Amino acid sequence: MNATNCTNCSDLSFETPETAMYLVVYKTLYLYILPIIVFVGLFGNLMSIYLIVVDKPMRNVSSSIFLMSLLGADTGMLLCLLLVWLETLGYPLNHLPAVCRINVYLTYVCGFLSIWYVVCITVETFITICYPTKIKQMCTLFRARIVTLVLLITALGLYVIAPLINKVQEGETGRPECRSVDKYAKYNQVIFYTDSALTLVVPFFLLIILLAFMTVAIMQSIQKKQQRSLKKTNENGTQTNLIRRLPQVRVAKMLYILSVSVVFLNAPSHFFKLKSLITNANILGYTEGLIYLICMFISYTSFAIKFFICIACSKNFRKLFFMYCCCWQAGRYHSIPQQTMETAT
């Protein structure tokens, strides 16, 4: 869906206040905000993957498999946005034939994987919060690896036709553009609606339902804790402590916040996409296009903030960060036994 009814906003003249406002916001977002999102996101995602890989207890948790896969998919999306920024600066690498097709394919694949890995994380968090006694049976490393691999193979196969029907062509303004070939318009439409269903309608419906159930469960748990007597039986106390020691329980808060942030950051832009699908309107006016452009950049931040969510919500992650990345803090944690790295988040 085009943000406005113009094909090249850099060619617009300042004939109306709406056009002038749009150009100011457009240039500010693409020239200054986009590189901040891209480079901060790349640093945070790669740092997060590094911390998970170097710490054996963390990488042996099933949710970490999904988290690393999600960070990898988000990194792919940020690399695609990097090409957009470079084009804004006057380096149209995306107009090279091979780069154009690879970029189209990578965008589809990483977009699909990013949202579905969030769904996987949310499902694990749902099991942890609502069915804690089933964690050991359902949240295993083997299952996480199989699901991750199946989703990857599905994405690679599902969009294999995308780079074949897109290439660099001369646009309406006479400049080269990376877009679908006219004679394959029917196939491109099929991919568009399929992708919209698989990356927008279905996963966000699942996310909203799961988050609603988890929110209710959390509220009920808080009420029970307030009403519960401080005196407990040894049996109940032992069972509760065993569940709380499970790695999935300790990271549940962080993963819940991560899922909520993805839904809220993407909700505004997805509203416009759903509206476009329902009304079949692909062209927006300047005011509506300006709002959509801002919402789109808000959704881009969801690819870049996972590291900060992990740092803010997980004591383990903060310890790992200081241990491996901050030399001046390293001495504080070298003497900590390995089991203390699994304290509650």
Image (cartoon, grey):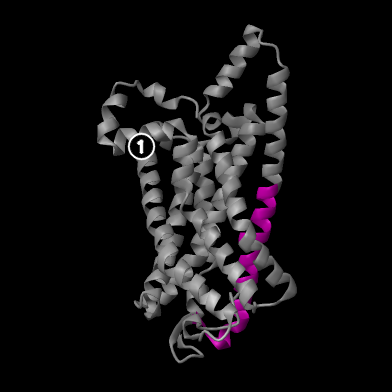
> What range is drawn magenta here?
179-208
Task: State the residue in front, 48 or 227.
Answer: 227
- Residue 198 in view here: no
Q: Which residue is depicted at the point 44% across and 45% down?
A: 307
Quadrant in which the N terminus appears: bottom right
Q: Rate crowding at label 1 as few (under 14), some (14 to 19) or many (20 or more) other CA atoms within 10 Å.
A: some
Under mark 1, the amino acid is: Phe
- Residue 182 in view here: yes
Secondary structure, magenta segment, majority class: helix
Up-down: is 212 above or below 217? Answer: below
Q: Is residue 259 left or right of residue 344?
A: right
Residue 184 part of the magenta segment: yes
The part of the image, by quadrant, that contains residue 249 is: top right
Task: State the residue in front, 217 or 22.
Answer: 22
Which residue carries the number 1 mark? 321
Helix, strand or loop for disc 1: helix
Which percent across, then down, holds residue 102?
42, 71
The part of the image, by quadrant, that contains residue 39 is: bottom left
Residue 228 part of the magenta segment: no
Q: Is residue 5 left or right of residue 279?
A: left
Which percent across, then down, holds residue 126?
64, 38
Q: Is residue 8 left or right of residue 82?
A: right
